[in-house]
Amino acid sequence: MSKKLFIRSSFAIGVCLVFAVLGVVAAQAGFENWYFSLQRPWFEVPQGIFSPVWIIMYILMGISAGIVWSKGFYHKWVKTALYHFGFQLFLNGFWFLLFFAFQKPFLALIDITALFILILITIRWFRIVNATAAYLLVPYAVWVLFAMALNFEIWRLN
C-alpha cells in the first residue's frame, strides 16, 4: 500500500466514521422510547449486531473512497465518482435523522430508497475508476437493501 493510498483511505475512513457517530447520536434520540414501542418485523437484527455491522460498512466505504481518491482528484471520473460517494454519504446520515431523531419512517423510507439507488450508481462510477473500490461497496449496498426492507416493514406495521 502506498503512502498516498494509506493517507487518503485513512482520511476517508475518518470522514465516514464521523457520519457513523452522527448516526449513533441520532439513533440514541429515538431508541429509548420510540423505537422499542414500534411493532417490528420478524427479521429484525438484534441491536448488538446492527451497530457493529454499520461500523464495518463505514470502514469499507472509507477504504473504497480512498482507493478512488488515490487515482487523482484531477481526473473527471474520479471527481464524478467521489461526488456521488459524498452525496450518498449525506443521504446515509440523513436517514438516521429521519428515522430515529425525527421518527418519520415513511420519509426515511424515501431517503433510504434514494440512498440505495445512489449506492448502485456510485458502485458503477467506482468500477470505472477501480474495480476493487467498487466491490468494497457491494456489502454496503446489500446491507442498505436489508435496512430498506426493515424500514418498509416498520412503516407498514405501524
Image: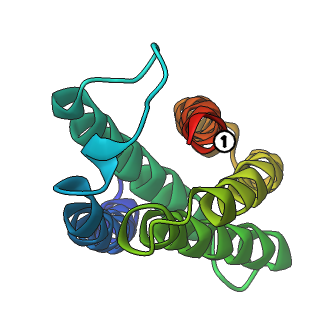
Q: How are the residues colored? A: rainbow
Helix, strand or loop status at disc 1: helix
Dividing the image into 4 quarters, which one contains the C terminus? top right
Closest to the observer, 3 or 81: 81
List x then y, in percent, for residue 156: 66, 37
**Which image quarter: residue 96?**
bottom left
Amino acid type of the residue tagged 1 in the rendering: Ala
Place of residue 74 in the rendered image (x, y in percent of width and height, measured from the top left): 71, 86
Q: Is residue 122 above or below residue 41?
A: below
Which quadrant of the view contains residue 33?
Answer: bottom left
Q: How many marks?
A: 1
155 horizontally vs 116: left or right: left
Vertical placement of 156 versus 118: above or below? above
Which quarter of the figure has residue 23? Answer: bottom left
Residue drawn at 38 percent across, 52 percent down:
58
- Is residue 55 in view from this perspective? no
Judge whether residue 73 can be spotted in this image.
Answer: yes
Q: Is residue 43 left or right of residue 118?
A: left
Q: Is residue 112 above or below residue 85?
A: above
Residue occupying the point 53% across, 33% down? 143
Image coordinates for residue 123, horizontal then vertical, percent: 74, 47
Q: Nearer the viewer, residue 138 or 116?
A: 116
Asked if residue 64 is positioned above or below residue 73 in the image, the reply reads above
Residue plotted at (67% across, 53% down): 109
Q: Which residue is mark 1?
A: 134
- Taking the view exactly as shown, the residue that stands out farthest to the top is 42
Residue 52 drawn at (x, y percent) = 22, 37
